[in-house]
Amino acid sequence: MHALKSVELLSKLIAFDTTSYKSNLEFILFVKDLFEQNNIKVELNFNIEQNKANLLASVGPLDQAGILLSGHSDVVPVEGQQWDTPAFEAIQKDAKIFGRGTADMKGFLACAMITMIKASQLELKRPLHLCISYDEEIGCIGVRGILDQLASTLISPIICVIGEPTMMQLALAHKGKTVFRAQCCGEEGHSALAPNYVNAIHVASKLVESLQNVQQHLREKGHQDQGYDIPYTTVHVGKITGGTALNIVPNKCVVDYEIRHLAQDSSANVQKQIIENIKDDFKKHIDVEEVNQYPGLKTSTTIEAVKFIQKLLPDETAIGNISFGTEGGLFQGALNCPVVVCGPGNIAVAHKPNEFVEIDQMKQCDIFLEKLLMSLSE
């Protein structure tokens, strides 16, 4: 059997439709079988419905601190997008591989899996681990199910590398995110008598006004981190649903909004400010629930493990922040280890039709992970 290459393996991975609302089990069982053929230890961690799983694979002595590679198996939907090629078929052209998930982030997973197979043929002094999660794209949900298991079975890793697409540049920080849903309540009535009733859309507008005011305050007086395109904590309304007919005073309006916060800011404090800014006679008609959240990431450039990773990358590699979120903060919290984000592909093509990863990016990732592997066997 000839040795698989990462580009070849990527073609197999793209063929699995692992859109977040579908099961990822076929994908995970493919990885498990491939690893077990190479005598790699694999553990699965299932969701309650048993139709999705996280995977942990390990090579080398488990009584030592090693390196953890991490990526998610799920991809975003392709429905309603105009693709020039079949979305779940890896098509090579112009030194690129097209297909859903090529950049985000099966390109990295292919490279990481090949590295694990190479690791299985070496005598490692320290272990190499790979964690593959589900449902990252809908709020870093799946990985939470395996964090306790990782914390109890792994010695805290030297470093965790999340392979999200950074064009193989090194990212050490991203904002945290909290998602809220506000149920704004009113009273139904005939619109001819509208002033007699509480209008749920009017209530919602007071909430939106407060969100805008808090955003202005954060922009002008809040913490700043110039490493980000938007250097302050942001508040964003993404969806409003309310009303049934023009001649009925609406009794319900739902507002979905998010806070993307710097490491120095707490989303709870920002949320408290948003609610406090609303007058009491409107506030009593608003019920807010936190729908989802994930922490931000902030890793210091001075940590030895970060310097070690830097040495494995080309001298011209940039170090900075990324605008999108990852599972990094969750790993950092659960495993008490430094986390960096570095992987092949460009986030600018992720989630879009005709997503692609450049073959050269895959090669750069292969070289990086090969050096990482060699360091574990020295």
Image (tube, rainbow, N blue to C red):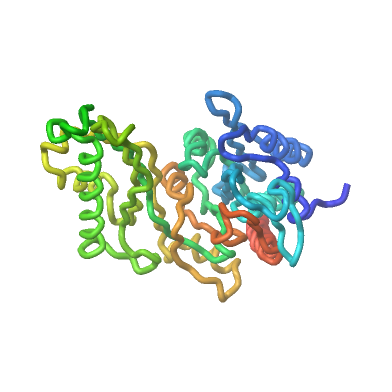
Q: From the viewer's perspective, is 209 left or right of 367? A: left
- Is 14 rendered above or below residue 309? above
Question: Would residue 125 be visible to someone looking at this image?
Answer: no
Q: In the rendered view of the protein, which quadrant contains the C terminus?
A: bottom right
Q: Residue at x 24, y 54 (%)?
A: 212
Q: From the viewer's perspective, is 77 left or right of 295? A: right
Foreground: 279 or 176? 279
- Image-quadrant location for residue 309: bottom right
| Residue 146 point in image, percent of width and height | 52, 35
Q: Residue at x 67, y 40 (%)?
A: 17
Q: Residue at x 49, y 41 (%)?
A: 138
- Image-quadrant location for residue 250: top left
| Residue 207 point in image, percent of width and height | 23, 44
In the rendered image, the residue lying farthest to the top is 49
Q: From the viewer's perspective, is 196 left or right of 288? A: left
Disc tally is: 0
Q: Residue at x 57, y 40 (%)?
A: 133
Foreground: 22 or 337? 22
| Residue 93 point in image, percent of width and height | 76, 63
Foreground: 29 or 254? 254
In the rendered image, the residue lying farthest to the bottom is 316
Question: Would residue 85 be visible to someone looking at this image?
Answer: yes
Foreground: 5 or 141? 141
Q: From the viewer's perspective, is 187 left or right of 151? A: left
In the rendered image, the residue lying farthest to the front is 192
| Residue 149 point in image, percent of width and height | 51, 34
- Image-quadrant location for residue 107: bottom right
